[in-house]
Image (cartoon, rainbow, N blue to C red):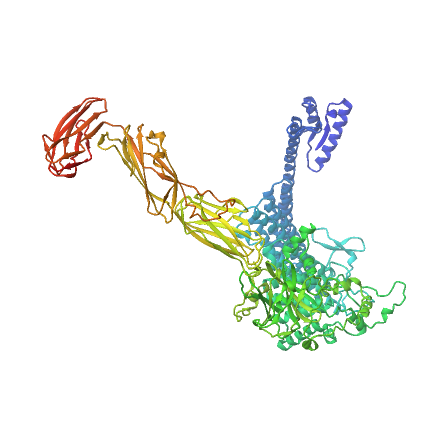
């Protein structure tokens, strides 16, 4: 692409000629390579179109097509936005230029690819062509074609050509015998082609094909087709390590990203496992390192020195080739022997031992330093570290990481880096111990024991020995296990004896102590001064100096449950940086391993009431070692809100009744001047036989002088985790009582204490005192709950249940809750068992205490029976002279005042219900122990009411039927006709009530108007009613409006109260209380107001004489606008004789009236019922039957 400016294009003839000359030079140079030229004219965005005559001139002089010349917008004014026209013009011009260049380049590479194909065809057609070389040439041709396809961005064609090239390379390895050098060259080329294929397939999201390619590549080169000598085999193992890593990072990384985005994976894709590939790479790296060490050792034993001049080795002309530079400065191929010698020098270079150090110390197995080539040990460590780093965030591969860590620790041990090996082994042992993998744990502990020996850490060496003994992993049988256990216990309790030191390799001849290893980098340190003067410290013997360098015979060991991920998260939150798990375990170097597996610990207690006077705590100890463990005693640390107290536990199965009670409130404790707790005393009769003198305290000054001969970093490394002093302000109570833990059985110890404060009582630590200054502390609070033994060791070891033989002792919960000190208060509720709807039932709640109670809280809850709505229930409480309405769900609470000892306090409460049913009221006193009491109240209606509607005597109405579905109990009345509503009240409940007031609320909106005020019937009120008393009301009502549906007549409001003599509650006038007046609602019946068609009124005398005729008449009034034809007939009645016709036909005019009369004679005396009359509207088919009326008949 040749770029010219528009000024050059539009310039004068001289500049035009100069520009053409330059373009011709560029064209000729490109033509020599078979390429073409594209001319771009750089101009401003507003320059317009290019001059056509100039374009024609350039195309004519350069023999170009017009489309090979186009304009390019280069410069833009500042401040343009993305959507502005100049910027868009520039993007369009650059895009056009890119498309044109890509098109021309594709044509160019197509021509080059066709040339390669033609040349390959010519070679194949040659008769002299060796058929054995055809796969080589085909592979070379396919690789070139694939590269040209990549240049054209033809990814599918590139994949096809690379696959063809890979197939030809496989034919090269299988077609004829290959030398190791040729096979290495083919493998190197196949590695490049394989990587190209993976990248292209993953770029095109052809995941399945990429997985097939990766699996096929690993399977093909896993077994070389030729027999390889050890150097060539080591070289090929390094090649396979790279292939496994590439497959894990490239293919599996892409698959994991696809799975994280929600893309489904086929079964073939799920077969690719990054952890398994990295594990295979690590195993190959370890095998390679061992093979290289074997080659090196064999060469050193045979004193074999290679004759190959490594300085003359050069890279060959092609990929994967190695050649030698001759004296004539030319390169010649290597022979097979020379190539193997080269590989031996590269894979297993000879080592040179460093000069001995002047500092005295134990014999060091420091490795020698390689003189050249690639160190296989360092390469192996790098592969293992890479695998661990790649799997650090994979939670499902934690056990695989532990296996890699174990392999890495072995490599660190082989390399002499014991400090790094120890860090890694601590992490591996943590995982295996937590998951209960005993066999891998034993392997890791054996290595950790060896590392502790190299780092001169005797206590860690002893603890590893004890844990191996508990696992049964010490070789040599029971006798060897018992001897090792005895020596380890002796080391921890009395310091390491000389016999154990010699067996561990820490004491030897004086010459062996002239070398010392720091444990981190293998460097030596000179103990002499730089001036050459001799220090008096150099006169100390090697044995004495090492004995002085040992840590004191004090071992404060802590067993803590450590969650590495949680610890890393907290460290990251505090420091903001990622903290390695190995560093965390290094800081917790004596809080994770060893004693947890040697002695199982279980905590138990005797279940108590919420107000216990004493608490019994028990400790179960199960010795998993083959020998008994003699203890000076055991203690437990209990903490509450006031601090921590250390209690001595008494060895026993169950505490006798005579066991003294430790009162925590009186435990003053003995605290040293420096804030550290003093040592617990031991019983005098056991001190002589169980205490061990501290041999190192008498020579403390000599120890410090001897330590001056060693390097400070080495001293720090050796003493890490050995001196564990504990600073605490905890008070201590009791005297240690020695006892012995028999092997494979449970031993028990307990303590009885009296709580001092209310709240949680937590067992923080259990401490086993092995000797003076030697103890094991179990941080019980750090272990997760839910296990009978700390850390769930019982499930791993399958030991018997700890407290199965102790009656009444149960496993200790995560924390005991002391809810109250002393006897709990008592709560009494004294409500009336029966209540009336609407009244506030008084509920006195009395709290009795034996000791002063302050800060208590009372909560209330009301539970209604089925069918009752909580909205109709009200709970009112007198809270310090103020009435408060509380919720019913237990959320209502109030603070109680301080109640003096042996006193009481009454809380006044009232409950009101508007629906009948049974209520349960609960009062809960939190002091803070919960003390609750419940009481039940049954609410019923105060009155039983009956209502009846009657019209005027002898008046009847004939109404037309209406298409209205009436309800049950609905009475039809006539508009304009007054009715009498009779209401009768009967008192149901025992006791008395006073009726204070009554009020009728008529349904005026429906046209029902009261005729007489009910106040006229309340003379002499308040009226006191007892159970069974009846009170009647007569309410005249006149309907004034028709109703389409049944309507309520209204309601009767009764205001009443309990008599003052029967009211419960405070008698003081100033004491607040709810209103004692209650308003009860008596619903009145429903009516249907209809229009009248005809009214019939019966008229008869008040009394008659038997045998004398009297007149019985029926007066009828027509209210309709049409005449009514009526048929009136008198029905028969006993005691009367009719004179005349029973039935008559009558026509009543519109808005008119008429009267029908019958002459009757009574033939009996007394109160008799007159006969009823039947009136029927013939045209309307309506009928009316009057009610029978009574008349008094006098005897004749």
Q: Position of residue 143 (x, y in %)?
A: 64, 47
Residue 233 in sight here: no
116 with respect to 857 (left or right): right
1150 with respect to 699 (left or right): left
User: In the picture shown, does residue 789 fall above or below 107?
Assistant: below
- Please give the count of numbered marks on the rendered protein: 0
Residue 801 in sight here: yes
In this view, the residue in front, 778 or 448, is 778
User: In the picture shown, does residue 1140 fall above or below 495?
Assistant: above
Quarter of the image for the C terminus: give it: top left
In this view, the residue in front, 522 or 753, is 753
Image quadrant in which you'd find residue 944: top left
805 with respect to 285 (left or right): left
In this view, the residue in front, 540 or 314, is 540
User: In the picture shown, does residue 197 fall above or below 298?
Assistant: above
Q: Position of residue 293 (x, y in %)?
A: 71, 65
Image quadrant in which you'd find residue 788: bottom right
In this view, the residue in front, 936 or 348, is 936
Residue under the image location 73 percent in, 35 percent down: 29
Q: Position of residue 463 (x, y in %)?
A: 67, 69
Q: Position of residue 1110 (x, y in %)?
A: 13, 31
Image quadrant in which you'd find residue 1173: top left
């Amino acid at each position: 692409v040749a770029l010219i400016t528009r000024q050059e294009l539009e310039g004068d003839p001289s500049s035009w000629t100069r520009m053409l000359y330059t373009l011709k030079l560029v064209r000729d140079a490109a033509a020599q390579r078979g390429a073409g030229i594209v001319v771009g004219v750089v101009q401003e965005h507003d320059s317009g179109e290019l001059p056509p005559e100039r374009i024609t001139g350039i195309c004519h002089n350069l023999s170009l097509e017009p489309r090979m010349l186009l304009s390019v917008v280069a410069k833009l004014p500042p401040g343009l936005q993305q959507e502005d026209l100049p910027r868009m013009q520039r993007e369009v011009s650059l895009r056009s230029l890119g498309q044109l260049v890509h098109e021309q380049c594709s044509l160019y590479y197509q021509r080059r690819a066709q040339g390669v194909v033609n040349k390959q065809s010519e070679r194949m057609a040659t008769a002299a062509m060796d058929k054995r070389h055809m796969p080589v040439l085909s592979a070379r041709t396919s690789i070139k074609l694939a590269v040209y396809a990549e240049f054209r961005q033809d990814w599918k064609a590139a994949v096809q050509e690379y696959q063809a090239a890979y197939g030809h390379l496989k034919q090269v390895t299988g077609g004829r015998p290959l030398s190791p050098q040729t096979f290495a060259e083919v493998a190197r080329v196949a590695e490049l082609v394989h990587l190209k294929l993976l990248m292209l397939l993953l770029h095109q999201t052809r995941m399945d094909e990429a997985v097939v390619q990766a699996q096929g590549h690993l399977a093909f080169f896993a077994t070389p087709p030729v027999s390889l000598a050890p150097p060539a085999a080591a070289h090929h193992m390094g090649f396979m390590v790279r292939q496994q890593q590439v497959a894990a990072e490239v293919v599996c990384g892409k698959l994991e990203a696809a799975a994280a985005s929600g893309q489904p994976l086929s079964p073939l894709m799920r077969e690719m496992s990054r952890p398994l590939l990295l594990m295979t790479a690590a195993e190959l790296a370890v095998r390679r390192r061992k093979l290289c060490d074997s080659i090196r050792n064999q060469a050193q034993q045979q004193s074999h020195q290679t004759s190959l001049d490594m300085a003359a080795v050069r890279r060959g002309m092609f990929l994967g080739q190695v050649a030698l530079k001759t004296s004539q400065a030319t390169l010649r191929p290597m022979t097979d022997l020379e190539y193997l010698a080269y590989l031996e020098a590269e894979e297993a270079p000879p080592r040179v031992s460093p000069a001995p150090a002047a500092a005295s110390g134990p014999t060091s197995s420091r490795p020698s330093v390689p003189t050249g080539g690639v160190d296989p040990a360092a390469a192996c460590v790098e592969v293992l570290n890479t695998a661990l780093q790649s799997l650090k965030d994979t939670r499902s591969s934690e056990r695989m990481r532990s296996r890699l860590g174990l392999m890495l620790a072995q490599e660190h041990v082989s390399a002499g880096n014991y400090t790094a090996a120890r860090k890694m082994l601590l992490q591996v042992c943590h995982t295996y111990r937590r998951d209960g993998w005993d066999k891998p744990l034993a392997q890791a502990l054996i290595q950790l024991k060896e590392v502790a020996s190299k780092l001169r850490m005797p206590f860690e060496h002893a603890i590893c020995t004890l844990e191996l003994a508990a696992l049964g992993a010490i070789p040599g049988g029971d006798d060897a296990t018992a001897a090792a256990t005895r020596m380890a216990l002796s080391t921890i309790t009395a310091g390491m004896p000389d016999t154990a030191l010699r067996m561990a390799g820490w004491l030897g001849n004086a010459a062996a102590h002239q070398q010392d290893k720091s444990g981190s980098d293998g460097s030596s340190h000179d103990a002499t001064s730089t001036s050459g003067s001799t220090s008096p410290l150099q006169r100390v013997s090697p044995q004495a100096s090492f004995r002085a360098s040992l840590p004191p015979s004090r071992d404060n060991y802590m067993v803590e449950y450590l969650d590495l991920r949680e610890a890393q998260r907290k460290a990251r939150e505090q420091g903001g940086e990622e903290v390695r798990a190995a560093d965390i375990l290094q800081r917790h170097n004596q809080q994770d391993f060893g004693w947890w597996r040697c002695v199982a610990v279980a905590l138990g207690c005797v279940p108590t009431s919420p107000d216990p006077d004493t608490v019994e705590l028990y400790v179960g100890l199960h010795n998993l070692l083959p020998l008994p463990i003699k203890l000076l005693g055991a203690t437990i640390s209990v903490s509450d809100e006031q601090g921590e107290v250390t209690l001595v536990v008494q060895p026993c199965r169950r505490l006798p009744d005579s066991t003294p009670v430790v009162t925590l409130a009186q435990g003053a404790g003995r605290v040293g001047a420096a804030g550290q707790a003093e040592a617990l005393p031991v019983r005098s009769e056991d001190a002589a036989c169980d205490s061990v003198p501290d041999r190192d305290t008498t020579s403390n000054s000599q120890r410090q002088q001897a330590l001056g001969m060693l390097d400070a970093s080495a001293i720090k490394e050796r003493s890490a985790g050995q001196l564990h002093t504990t600073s605490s302000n905890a008070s201590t109570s009791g005297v240690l009582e020695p006892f012995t833990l028999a092997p494979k059985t449970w031993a028990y110890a307990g303590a009885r204490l009296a709580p001092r404060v209310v709240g949680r009582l937590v067992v923080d630590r259990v401490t086993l005192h092995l000797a003076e200054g030697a103890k094991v502390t179990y941080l019980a609070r750090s272990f997760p709950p839910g296990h009978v033994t700390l850390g769930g060791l019982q499930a791993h070891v399958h030991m018997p249940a700890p407290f199965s033989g102790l009656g009444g002792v149960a496993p200790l919960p995560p924390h005991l809750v002391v809810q109250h000190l002393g006897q709990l208060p008592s709560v009494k509720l004294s409500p009336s068992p029966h209540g009336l709807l609407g009244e506030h039932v008084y509920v006195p709640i009395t709290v009795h205490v034996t000791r002063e109670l302050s800060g208590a809280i009372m909560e209330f809850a009301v539970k209604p029976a089925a069918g009752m709505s909580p909205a109709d229930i009200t709970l009112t409480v007198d809270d310090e002279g103020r009435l408060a309405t509380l919720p019913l769900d237990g959320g209502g609470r109030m603070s109680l005042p301080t109640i003096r000892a042996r006193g009481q306090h009454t809380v006044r409460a009232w409950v009101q219900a508007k629906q009948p049913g049974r209520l349960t009221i609960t009062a809960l006193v939190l002091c803070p122990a919960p003390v609750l009491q419940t009481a039940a109240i049954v609410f019923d209606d105060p009155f039983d009411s009956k209502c009846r509607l009657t019209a005027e005597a002898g008046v009847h109405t004939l109404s037309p039927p209406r298409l209205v579905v009436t309800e049950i109990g609905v009475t039809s009345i006539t508009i304009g006709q007054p009715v009498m509503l009779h209401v009768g009240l009967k008192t149901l409940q025992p006791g008395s009530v006073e009726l204070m007031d009554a009020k009728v609320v008529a349904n005026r909106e429906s046209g029902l108007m009261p005729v007489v005020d009910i106040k006229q019937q309340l003379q002499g009120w308040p009226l006191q009613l007892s159970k069974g008393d009846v009170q009647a009301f007569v309410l005249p009502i006149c309907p004034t409006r028709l109703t389409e549906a049944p309507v309520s007549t209204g309601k009767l409001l009764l205001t009443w109260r309990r008599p003052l003599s029967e009211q419960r509650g405070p008698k003081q006038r100033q004491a607040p209380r709810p209103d004692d007046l209650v308003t009860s609602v008596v619903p009145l019946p429903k009516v249907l107001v209809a229009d009248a068609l005809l009214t019939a009124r019966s008229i008869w005398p008040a009394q008659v004489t038997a045998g004398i005729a009297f007149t019985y008449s029926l007066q009828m009034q027509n209210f309709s606008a049409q005449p009514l034809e009526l048929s009136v007939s008198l029905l028969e009645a006993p005691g009367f004789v009719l004179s005349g016709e029973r039935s008559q036909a009558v026509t009543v005019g519109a808005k008119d009236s008429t009267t029908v009369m019958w002459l009757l004679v009574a033939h009996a005396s007394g109160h008799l019922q007159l006969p009823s009359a039947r009136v029927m509207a013939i045209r309307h088919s309506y009928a009316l039957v009057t009610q029978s009326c009574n008349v008094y008949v006098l005897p004749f």
